[in-house]
């Protein structure tokens, strides 16, 4: 009813609609916000609180006395700084490698391949996601081993396998998260109208120039969107590094060993605030690029 | 408040117990292990007789100790138990001793396979009851050198049934490592000889291996028990391990990682369980193990029962069953350790199994420094210093790995 | 096409090369499932079907598979409801805190799994006093799956605008009828894309699962994790992985059939 009368009573309709929409929005938002806003954020807050407590080493019970000792340890003991820097460097490197590899593939899929080939390529990119993460990491362990596939292939060139360590960790992480970069970039490039490329060519731009001046800037938000996945997934990893990391350890390893072996939740919680802070900062920065609409 | 103070009492009691009971470690030193004057163990009733089975039992076990055939139909000793007794076995696995203690303290589990670094904590906190060994048919067949030890008894009263044990050996690749090593020095002082090919166990408890080496080679540090290290002694062990790290290819924490590394040649020397070495050898790896002259660390596990268990009859039935020759033979071969009940030796599929694992060799067992959780009260009886606890060891381990 | 022949050839070459690298470890997994060596020695000395036989008889693997399917379906169902609600709520409306809402929805997947894992585990066990179970795994999985549905719904609504629904309302249909007859059909393929991604995420998740599962609940990744490190089970795990890769064609194929366009159906491309 209101709607049919609308043209005559413009202003009041707008305000009433707005109010009604406000109510609807509120109703619709209540369940997801209860789940995420209250339960999930509440859990994160509880974790933060826990990091300010301490633990009794003998009984393993948490003692609820307020202390900043965990954070003092975290910032004053050198090894944690080294590990943080190392973890962030690896996460950044993995992200860059994935972006460099994903861009040409996504571009080929979106703008060159025929619809049939495109369909096959999407399947080809998605299939590895279904093979277990662990099994893939273990397959790489075999490849990196002495006399494994990599040294076997590299031997004729006088090279050898990098062995287990940070190089292997970076490669494996980049491998594991590559599809998470390809998919958003592909989706982003698909939205790029062909006419834009043609216009650029018509204006005399070389394809390399088109790529650099038109495609890349347009695809940038999608690349950033993908980077959220690759960066965050790499930063929290503790399993791949255990399988191919040799002696190396990352933030995830420290959190895990403090929970698993030492049963020290307060300190683990304190360590876990590092990736949370980094990720929040990262999200705040990339929000400006419009990447969050590209996930 | 009341809860906390009673807990604190328990802690104090436990600390006192540990200080007294573990006064002399577990090594060849002999000496007193039960002088418990001034200490009162939680006064818990002992079971008098076996009644009717309750129909189920909740088991807390190390992975591999209670297999029910779901992973491999041929690996199943839980189902026969269920058929025999009518007790349905609900098995829950834990991965560390700390987790075992935490779970056992919830009171939801009837029996637990506790290692030496968990068993005393459970006794002290009143989560493990004295065991009436007269009710267990198979108890008599258990090797006597495993009975009435520091980690499973108080004042001659058993708090559990010994299950199995093993040592952390020095494994090496016979093609690369020549001459055959006889000392842990091969992975500490001389680690650089096998640069990038050394392997070590990935756990803070491995610090004890370094401490054991220092105990024999740097007597001036005054280490008497590798699990009782003051700040300086810990620092010395940490320095040694940091030096070792330069030559380490990787730290292993599971069977497959190490077996694979020895088979491919990524690792040529390092600490290993007998089982890993035998598996790698079966894959054709040129691998041998040695019990070095400094002796070695190891583990010894005990089945314990919850004093408030609502399924105590089924719990006793399980403890009896799992220490029967048949079950022991299966577990020992599957997990790769020496069975506590050596009647199992006649039933293993590989008849040389018990010899390989020194199951009947008391002298060998006595040489092992069994895993014990380091706590701030020095386990070697010193009272003038504060020892480093497991939390310190964890931090140190993170630093060692860098 | 406005990209030069040379550039196109280069793109093709890179694509092929990367795909070869992507598939090499997978091929190795399949090969190793036939490798007689229990620790996957390279090159294989001999081949056997023993592991496939063992895998077929592994009740542990089978029940873990069903647990995973159950968890993934339940988590996806929750994610579909909550994600759609959030997507509908945020359409067109510009209210204060809109960005905060999107951020909150994004957070569970943007934060490393280990953080989400220990936060939820701590909340369940110490704050709420709930015992870990299948139910807690589902809650945890749904938490990070909501975003996949939400993103797809929101993007679809943005692209299609509200004209159709406006028309429906103008013709006298109520909000529910409009949703049933107009909005939902419009969203169907986007929902499918979101659901598929959500299912996949949940199915292969291990980190959050490790912390929110009681050791008695075994999802497939947990089963794999436990068995990969047992010498006699490693090759069996390879068999399971090989089977998973082969079977992954099914959901992908279904999505293609149901959504009309694979690319759109699977990536939520818009």
Image (cartoon, helix red, strand yellow):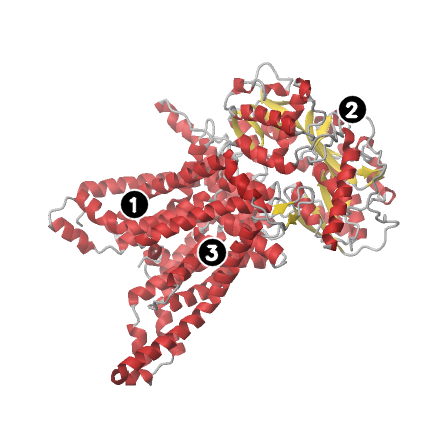
Residue at coordinates 18% horizontally, 54% vertically from top-left?
A196
Whole-angstrom CA distance, mark 3 to mark 2, is 56 Å
Q: Chain of mark 2?
A: B
Across and down, in percent, residue A214 comes to 20, 49
Give neighbour class at mark 1: few <14, some 14-19, many 20+ (Cα, 10 Å). Answer: many
Whole-angstrom CA distance, mark 1 to mark 2, is 67 Å
The vertical placement of C219 against A152, above or below, is: below
Residue C148 visible here: yes
Q: Nearer the viewer, mark 3 or mark 1?
A: 3
* Tag of residue C144: 3
Q: Secondary structure at mark 2?
A: loop
Q: Chain of mark 1?
A: A
Residue at coordinates 20% horizontally, 47% vertically from top-left?
A213
The residue tagged 1 is: A103
Give neighbour class at mark 2: few <14, some 14-19, many 20+ (Cα, 10 Å). Answer: few
* Tag of residue B29: 2
Q: Secondary structure at mark 3?
A: helix
Across and down, in percent, residue B369 comes to 71, 28
């Amino acid at each position: 009813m209101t709607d049919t009368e609308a043209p005559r009573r413009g202003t009041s309709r707008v305000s009433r609609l707005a109010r009604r929409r406000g109510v609807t929005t509120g109703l619709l938002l209540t369940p997801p916000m209860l789940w995420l806003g209250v339960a999930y954020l509440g859990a994160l807050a509880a974790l933060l609180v826990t990091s300010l407590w301490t633990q009794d080493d003998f009984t393993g019970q948490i003692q609820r006395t307020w202390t900043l000792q965990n954070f003092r340890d975290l910032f004053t003991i050198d090894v944690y700084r080294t590990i943080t820097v190392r973890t962030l460097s690896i996460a950044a490197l993995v992200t860059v490698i994935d972006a460099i590899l994903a861009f040409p593939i996504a571009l080929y899929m979106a703008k060159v391949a025929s619809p049939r080939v495109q369909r096959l390529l999407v399947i080809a990119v998605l299939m590895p996601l279904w093979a277990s993460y662990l099994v893939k990491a273990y397959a790489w362990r075999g490849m990196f081993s002495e006399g494994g596939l990599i040294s076997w292939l590299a031997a004729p060139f006088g090279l050898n396998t990098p062995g287990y360590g940070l190089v292997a960790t970076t490669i494996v992480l980049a491998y594991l998260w590559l599809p998470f970069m390809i998919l958003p970039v592909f989706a982003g490039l698909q939205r790029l109208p062909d006419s834009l490329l043609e216009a650029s060519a018509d204006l005399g731009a070389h394809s390399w120039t088109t790529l650099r001046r038109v495609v890349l800037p347009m695809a940038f938000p999608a690349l950033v969107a993908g980077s959220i996945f690759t960066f965050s997934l790499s930063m929290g990893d503790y399993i791949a590094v255990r399988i191919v990391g040799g002696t190396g350890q990352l933030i995830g390893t420290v959190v895990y060993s403090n929970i698993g072996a030492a049963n020290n939740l307060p300190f683990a919680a304190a360590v876990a605030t590092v990736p949370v802070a980094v990720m929040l900062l990262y999200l705040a920065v990339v929000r400006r690029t419009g990447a969050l609409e590209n996930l | 408040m009341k809860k906390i103070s009673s807990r604190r009492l328990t802690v104090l009691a436990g600390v006192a117990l540990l200080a007294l009971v573990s006064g002399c470690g577990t090594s060849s030193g002999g000496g007193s292990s039960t002088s418990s004057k001034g200490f009162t163990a939680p006064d818990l009733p002992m079971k008098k007789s076996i009644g009717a089975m309750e129909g189920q039992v909740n088991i807390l076990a190390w992975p591999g100790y209670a297999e029910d055939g779901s992973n491999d139909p041929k690996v199943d000793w839980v189902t026969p138990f269920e058929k025999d007794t009518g007790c349905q076995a609900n098995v829950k696995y834990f991965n560390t001793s700390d987790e075992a203690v935490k779970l056992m303290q919830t009171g939801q589990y009837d029996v637990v396979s506790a290692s030496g670094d968990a068993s005393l904590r459970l006794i002290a906190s009143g989560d493990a009851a004295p065991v009436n060994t007269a009710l267990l048919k198979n108890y008599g067949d258990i090797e006597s050198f495993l009975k009435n030890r520091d980690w499973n008894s108080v004042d001659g009263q058993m708090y559990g049934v010994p299950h199995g044990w093993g040592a952390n050996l020095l494994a090496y690749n016979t093609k690369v490592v020549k001459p055959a090593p006889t000392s842990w020095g091969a992975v500490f002082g001389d680690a650089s000889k096998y640069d990038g090919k050394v392997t070590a166990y990935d756990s803070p408890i491995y610090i004890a291996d370094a401490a054991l080496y220092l105990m024999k080679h740097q007597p001036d540090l005054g280490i008497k028990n590798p699990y009782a290290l003051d700040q300086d002694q810990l620092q010395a062990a940490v320095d040694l391990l940091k030096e070792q790290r330069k030559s380490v290819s990787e730290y292993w924490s599971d069977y497959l990682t190490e077996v694979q590394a020895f088979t491919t040649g990524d690792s040529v020397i390092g600490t290993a369980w007998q089982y890993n070495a035998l598996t790698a050898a079966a894959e054709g790896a040129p691998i041998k193990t040695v019990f070095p002259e400094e002796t070695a660390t190891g583990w010894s596990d005990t089945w314990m029962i919850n004093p408030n268990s609502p399924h105590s009859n089924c719990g006793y039935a399980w403890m009896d069953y799992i220490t029967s020759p048949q079950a022991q033979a299966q577990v020992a071969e599957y997990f790769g350790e020496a069975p506590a009940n050596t009647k199992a030796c006649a039933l293993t599929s590989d008849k040389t199994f018990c010899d390989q694992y020194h199951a009947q060799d008391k002298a060998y067992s006595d040489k092992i420094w069994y895993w014990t959780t380091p706590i701030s009260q020095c386990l070697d009886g010193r009272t003038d210093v504060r020892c480093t606890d497991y939390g310190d060891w964890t931090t140190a381990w993170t630093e060692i790995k860098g | 096409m406005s990209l030069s022949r040379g550039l196109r050839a280069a793109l093709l070459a890179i694509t092929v090369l990367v795909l070869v690298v992507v598939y090499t470890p997978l091929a190795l997994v399949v090969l190793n499932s036939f490798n007689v060596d229990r620790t996957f020695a390279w090159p294989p000395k001999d081949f056997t079907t023993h592991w496939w036989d063992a895998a077929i008889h592994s009740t542990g693997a089978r029940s873990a598979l069903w647990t995973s399917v159950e968890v993934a379906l339940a988590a996806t169902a929750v994610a579909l409801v909550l994600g759609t609600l959030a997507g509908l709520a945020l359409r067109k409306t510009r209210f204060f805190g809109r960005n905060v809402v999107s951020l909150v929805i994004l957070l569970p997947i943007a934060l490393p799994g280990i953080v989400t894992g220990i936060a939820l585990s701590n909340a369940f066990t110490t704050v709420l006093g709930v015992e870990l179970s299948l139910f807690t795994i589902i809650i945890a999985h749904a938490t990070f799956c909501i975003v996949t549905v939400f993103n797809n719904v929101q993007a679809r609504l943005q692209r299609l605008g509200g004209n159709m629904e406006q028309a429906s309302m103008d013709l006298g249909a109520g909000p529910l009828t409009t949703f049933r007859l107009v909005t939902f059909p419009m969203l169907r393929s986007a929902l499918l894309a979101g659901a598929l991604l959500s299912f996949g995420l949940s199915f292969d998740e291990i980190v959050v699962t490790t912390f929110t599962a009681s050791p008695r609940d075994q999802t497939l990744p947990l089963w794999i994790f436990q068995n990969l490190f047992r010498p006699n089970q490693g090759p069996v795990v390879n068999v399971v992985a090989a089977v998973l890769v082969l079977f992954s064609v099914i959901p992908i194929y279904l999505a293609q059939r149901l959504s009309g366009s694979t690319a759109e159906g699977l990536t939520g491309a818009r």
